Image: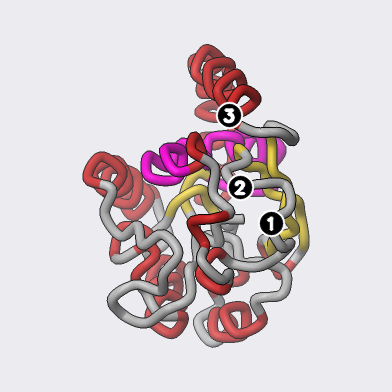
Amino acid sequence: MYLKIKRLIDIILSTVGLILLSPVFLILIVAIKIDSKGPVFFKQKRVGIHKSHFNIFKFRTMRIDTPKDTPTHLLENPDQWITKVGKFLRRSSLDELPQIINIFRGEMSIIGPRPALWNQYDLIEERDKYNANDVPVGLTGWAQINGRDELSIEIKAKLDGEYTEKIGFRMDVRCFWGTVISVLRTEGVVEGGTGTEKADKESLRE
């Protein structure tokens, strides 16, 4: 029953978000176009609920000649691929805003485990242990407010499992406000690295 309520909340909030944030979208689109050549949006194949595939949307933060389907931490000298505007977008998490479109379309939820890359088999397999692949993926989640880029795959999957076990309105509210605080403090962002806990970057920034 809660998943139906959750979907209704997602529709309402994503619709309001697209309307209210349209001026922000416009400013960022102009900034990206002025800063570097290439499309404004970045699409990438990700894993959704029940391990289904969909294309996630982000504002492009990297050069168009960046190797495809490779997490930032696996690139040699990651900073060379990130644009000037891209660095700001990543630090502020504004590059994630287009995912409101994914939420509106029902491919994602506001709160849930972050969608893995289609070829990140280790994370997908680890999440299976906790049934974390059987809930809607989200813009942000329990793992994001408990370490974000610093977490190892094992810890990340375990936290996603905790969310799956406790999924409900109260848990989603905790994740939402925890995300607001984390973003304001830019906590857990380890650009081009694996973080203090020697992990891959689950946020998989392009």
Give the x, y percent position of residue 151: 36, 74
* Rendered image: mark on residue 66: 1
User: Residue at the spot x=55%, y=79% of the render?
Assistant: 127
Give the x, y percent position of residue 70: 65, 68
157 sits to left or right of 142: right
In this figure, which residue is indicated by the disc labeled 2? 62
Q: Which residues are magenta?
A: 87-109
Q: Nearer the viewer, residue 2 or 143?
A: 143
At label 1, counting other C-alpha atoms closer than 10 Å, the crowd grade (few under 14, some 14-19, many 20 or more) is some
Which amino acid does the dot numbered 3 rest on? Asp
78 sits to left or right of 91: right
Please say if the residues under marks 2 and 1 sit with CB atoms less than 8 Å apart. Answer: yes
User: Residue at the spot x=68%, y=60% of the render?
Assistant: 48
- CA separation in Å, label 2 and label 1: 7 Å
At label 3, counting other C-alpha atoms closer than 10 Å, the crowd grade (few under 14, some 14-19, many 20 or more) is few
Which amino acid does the dot numbered 1 rest on? Thr
Disc with the residue nearer the chain's start (1 vs 3): 3
The picture quadrant where one finds residue 47 is bottom right
86 up-or-down from 153: above or below: above
Q: Is residue 88 something one can see in this rendering?
A: yes
User: Residue at the spot x=76%, y=64% of the render?
Assistant: 52
* Rendered image: mark on residue 35: 3
